[in-house]
Amino acid sequence: MVTVGFVAQPNPRSALDAVDLILQAGDLTRMQIAAAYITSKGVHDFVDLLSTRLGNAWNGIDKRWLTSFDYCRSEPVALQALKSLPSSRVRVQNAAFCLAHQGVPKTPFHPKAFFFESADRLFVLAGSGNLSRSGLSKGFEAGLVVAVDRTGDEHTTAFQSIDALRGWFLTHWNSAAPLKAGLLNTYETLFESVSNLKHPVPTEDDIASSDAGRGALSSKDLHKLRVGEHFWIEAGNITKNRGPQLPGTQLMMKRLSRVFFGFDAIAVHENTFIGNVSMRFNGGPLNAYSLTYSDNGMDKLTLPIPGAGGPAAWDNRNLLFTRDTPTQFTVTLGTPANKAQWSKASKAIEAAFRMSSGREWGVF
């Protein structure tokens, strides 16, 4: 039996909606993804859907990801996250040439094809969206889903077309470079170079800010928040939210600082809960901490409780947040000398800022 579905974003059916329908059709044994570029937001949304829906079966599914280093659009932390998944392999098309030419490909790699296999059926989702949040659910995208039975449909044009497309994937998979640690490190060095972070190439996850108020971050600034792996800030006087005699936990940040932590640059009402940030301090356990848009027009991040997972107090300290995975962060304290190094790194890519209170912060 041949069945056909569609993707029409942002409504009525996103690529994630289409994948969700595929997951309901039977037990998957393999998935093969060819995507031109891969972002942290896309990895988070895609893996969250599949791992939640499939439960323990997720670990055993053979996962193949074929992508590129073209134009430094794929994020190293996102590629590492895919590489670290159980039963998962990542390969990069024309990697050596692209790295030798500062991210410019000989022939651009631009497919967006998602293959899924179960014992009984073959599925392909082919469309316009990459493995990014915009490509999977938020942006304007279109595509088709075709499913065929593994027996009974062998002579249909639909089966033959899917089989030919799977052959195309296998050909380029076999010729692509496995994403080993050395290759990823070389790409990460290029991605984090001053020249790239100063003028990073936008992806579809970069959207213009609707915030036109005084002192607002520009779209270019927000792009640097998305691609930077480090966010530092002078904490200043922390709000005493735990009582007048206890050190507080609420760090006030520039509005839309949330973009660094993986949230979209969209306007929300005051006192809106934005989401939880998974964070650890000083090698401690990973916990969820709330991020809110406060009634003072700032993004408010809750920090670990002082003395119980945090330092004696956060006030007037220099804080560095490092993105460990697309959704996990480590916060560390820095000396004045550390802060000077962070500031220098941010200034090199024109991503050092100062709030109206005088507190400095930046990304690199």
Image (cartoon, grey):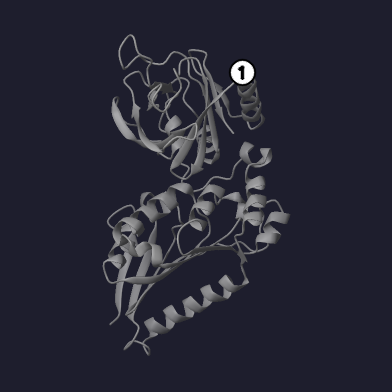
Q: Which residue is outermost to the right?
A: 100
**The C terminus - image quarter:** top right
Measuring 37% from the left and 49% from the top, which residue is drawn there? 138
176 lies above or below 2? above
Residue 127 % position (x, y): 42, 64
Packing grade of label 1 (10 A; few <14, some 14-19, many >=20) is few
Which amino acid type is shown beneath numbered disc 1? Pro
Residue 182 % position (x, y): 66, 55
Give the total of numbered labels. 1
Residue 48 % position (x, y): 36, 53
- Viewer-closest of 249 and 147: 249
Residue 248 lies in quadrant = top left
Asked which secondary structure carries label 1, the reply is helix
Residue 284 lies in quadrant = top left
Is residue 176 found left or right of 101 in the rendered image? left
**The N terminus - image quarter:** bottom left
- Viewer-closest of 112 and 38: 38
Is residue 14 found left or right of 73 in the rendered image? left
Measuring 42% from the left and 54% from the top, which residue is drawn there? 135
Residue 330 % position (x, y): 49, 35
307 lies above or below 206? above
Per the image, the residue denoted by label 1 is 336
